[in-house]
Image (spheres, coloured by chain):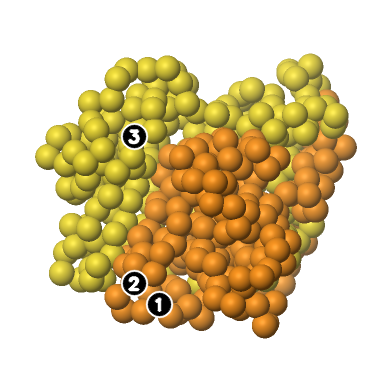
Chain colours: A orange, B yellow
Amino acid sequence: MHDHHDHGGSEFDDMTARVRALETVLVEKGLVDPAAVDEIVETYENRVGPRNGAAVVARAWTDPAFAERLRRDATEAIAAMGFGGRQGEHMVAVFNTPEEHNLVVCTLCSCYPWPVLGLPPAWYKSPDYRARAVREPRAVLAEFGVRLPEETRIRVWDSTAEIRYLVIPERPAGTEGMDEAALAALVTRDSMIGCGQPRAPETA
Amino acid sequence: MNGPQDVGGRHGFGRVVPEDESLRFHADWEKRVLGLTLASAALGYWTLDASRHARESLHPATYYTASYYEIWLRALESLLQRSGEVTPDELAEGRAHRTGLRADRRLRPDAVGAALARGGPTLREGPAPAFAVGDRVRTRNHQPAGHTRLPSYARGAAGVIEAVHGCHVFPDTHAHGLGEAPCPLYTVRFDAAELYGAAAEPGLIVSIDAWEPYLDPA
């Protein structure tokens, strides 16, 4: 649902024309500078993305004092790594344990921690994910190939306000000697939403 | 509002289709919609809450068949028309009939970085919280026709305060130009059985973030 390939083949062209019309009107009116639009796109296409969050997770894995800071005030701890701003103004980090697995959703729209994860993927914004994540998260996780032990409790965070949640997955076994950069490479975007697990070191 | 956006816990939706994290956009027009939406917000006609309300106010048949960037585009067209900056004729023709009213507020390319870094923090001074961590509360049967952030699946449900976040801008007023009305914001956790009855997944815990006017003591 809601992915463009599901629609008729002409939708790309129709949407392209419609967006171009709007941009032209706004630029002619002097309300929008297309170079500002380019700059916004460049920011979220190439500069701000889930590698930011992966760096935060890797530091939390290797530096207990940082992990503690993250628990106490995630906005401050994440800002200290240089990440913050729009859609990450008020951050909370939630830590997976063998007993509890965290999963993040926004059932009402698409709230997502942009400074650490970038723009949300299409599935995160889809009614399919939003409807089901709060009711049948195990079935949703199975669609990501994630099967949790029966005894692991699932905790779903519905982002209904301006608090943004970052999942800190458990550090994979067999990574004892790895440095922060190597660990960050194991951290997937989906694992920071709660829809995945970090990669095992041998498959990284 | 009991609109199409309020899908949490609904039945009948389909599979979730994962995608690679390197994929940022599915088409070039999506990039322009993102940029136009953020750049137009700088004109100062609407708040983030008002833009969410414009999206959820789309007809349900449109909302469920549009991609998310199409929802953003339609809401942006609507917000710009309501602000008096563009007309349907201009959008249909793809050319401006007159100059903009707030061209002086146009977002400059060299101001983008600072605007994104500033974001829109919602923490404010406000009243002392009525509830503390561990208190039992019940969400109200709160069903305004306008914007609200209390999802229907969590209405009238008993839960426990898990965190107190200070006072935040209240979306129910802010979306409608009725002021920020900051009030205490909480994380409230529920046992899934309280939300879904006997059909609930055993052991599942779900939380929402709820402003004080959504809550009563339980």
Q: Which residue lies under the disc numbered 1?
A: A148
Residue A50 in sight in this render: no
Within-10-Å neighbours for mark 3: few <14, some 14–19, many 20+? some
Numbered label attached to residue A152: 2
Residue contact at pointers 2 and 3, CB within 8 angstroms: no
Task: Please state the horizontal and vertical placement of residue A63, each as a whole percent of the image.
Answer: 59, 52
Front-most of residues B133 and A142: B133
Front-most of residues A191 and B154: A191
Numbered label attached to residue A103: none
Which residue is depicted at the point 22% across and 45% down?
Answer: B160
Which residue is depicted at the point 75% across and 29% down?
Answer: B114
Within-10-Å neighbours for mark 1: few <14, some 14–19, many 20+? some
Which residue is depicted at the point 73% across and 61% down?
Answer: A181
Pointer 3 indicates a residue of which chain?
A: B
The secondary element bearing badge 2 is classed as loop
Q: Is residue A167 above or below residue B78?
A: below
Amino acid carrying label 3: it is Val
In the shown orientation, is residue B93 left or right of residue B173? right
Q: CA distance from mark 2 to mark 3?
A: 26 Å
Task: Please state the horizontal and vertical placement of residue B4, each as a whole percent of the image.
Answer: 41, 52
Q: Which residue lies under the disc numbered 3?
A: B164
In the picture, the quarter occupied by the N terminus of chain A is: bottom right
Q: Is residue B168 above or below residue B33?
A: above
Where on the picture, by quarter, is residue B187? top left
Residue contact at pointers 1 and 2, CB within 8 angstroms: yes
In the picture, the quarter occupied by the C terminus of chain A is: bottom right
